[in-house]
Image: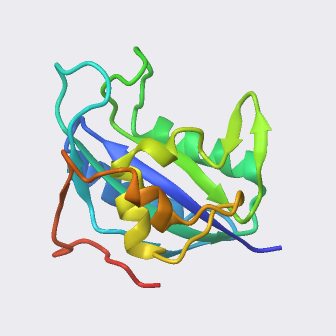
């Protein structure tokens, strides 16, 4: 069965813009998966240690028949091809891919929590998500619009879509 999944993308190392653009192509190449929309990109300051570059962030909408855990493994494989190394919590990274939502499912496993545990407080996730799914309602019945009301856009900057695969759905 095909499900809609929303994937957060972020990078702040080794040409972040190229990292996220390449990741979109790699998401499209996953088995039984089609990228149906990509948000505009946003720059944001790092959440963790301040002695690292700003991030480029966005959200992709997928239609996929991959179940949640195989999708997670596929995303980790893409991160690996981008030479992601986890040295410190919230540290710099070449690529970060997180499953935000997977259909209306709620998953609470040690390796995967859906909806993403921290998405409701991250403006660099909510604003790009709203660009491609403004009417979205989370599995708990809270609308994306409600979350945005309590998550101001301070610190993030929306970039134009010029040269970037833009919103298509």
Q: Which residue is more in the foreground, 57 or 127?
A: 127
Query: Is residue 28 among the parts visible in the rendering?
Result: no
Based on the displayed image, in which of its 4 quarters is residue 163 positioned? bottom left
Q: Is residue 32 above or below residue 155?
A: below
Residue ranking furthest to the bottom: 169
The location of residue 69, given as percent across then percent down, is: 75, 45
Residue at 44% from the left image edge and 43% from the top image edge: 121
* Left or right: 44 in relation to 67: left
| Residue 83 percent location from the top left of the image | 40, 32
Front-most of residues 26 and 119: 119
Q: Which of the pair 14/104 is nearer the observer?
A: 104
Q: Is residue 61 visible?
A: yes
User: Depth check: 5 or 138 in front?
Assistant: 138
Q: Position of residue 99 (x, y in %)?
A: 59, 50
Residue in the image at 65% along x and 45% along y: 72
Give the image location of residue 42, x and y in percent: 24, 56
């Amino acid at each position: 069965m095909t499900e809609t999944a929303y994937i957060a993308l972020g990078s702040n190392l080794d040409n972040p813009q190229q990292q996220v653009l390449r990741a979109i192509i790699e998401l499209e190449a996953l088995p039984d998966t089609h990228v149906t929309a990509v948000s505009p990109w946003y720059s944001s300051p790092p959440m963790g240690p301040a002695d690292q570059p700003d991030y480029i962030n966005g959200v992709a909408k997928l239609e996929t028949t991959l179940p949640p855990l195989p999708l997670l493994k596929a995303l980790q494989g893409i991160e690996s091809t981008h030479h992601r190394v986890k040295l410190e919590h919230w540290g710099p990274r070449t690529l970060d891919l997180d499953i935000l939502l997977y259909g209306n499912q709620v998953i609470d496993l040690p390796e995967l929590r859906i909806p993403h545990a921290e998405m409701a407080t991250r403006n660099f996730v909510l604003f790009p998500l709203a660009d491609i799914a403004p009417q979205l309602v989370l599995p708990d019945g809270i609308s994306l619009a409600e979350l945005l009301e309590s998550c101001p856009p301070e610190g993030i900057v929306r970039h134009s879509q010029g040269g970037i695969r833009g919103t298509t759905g």
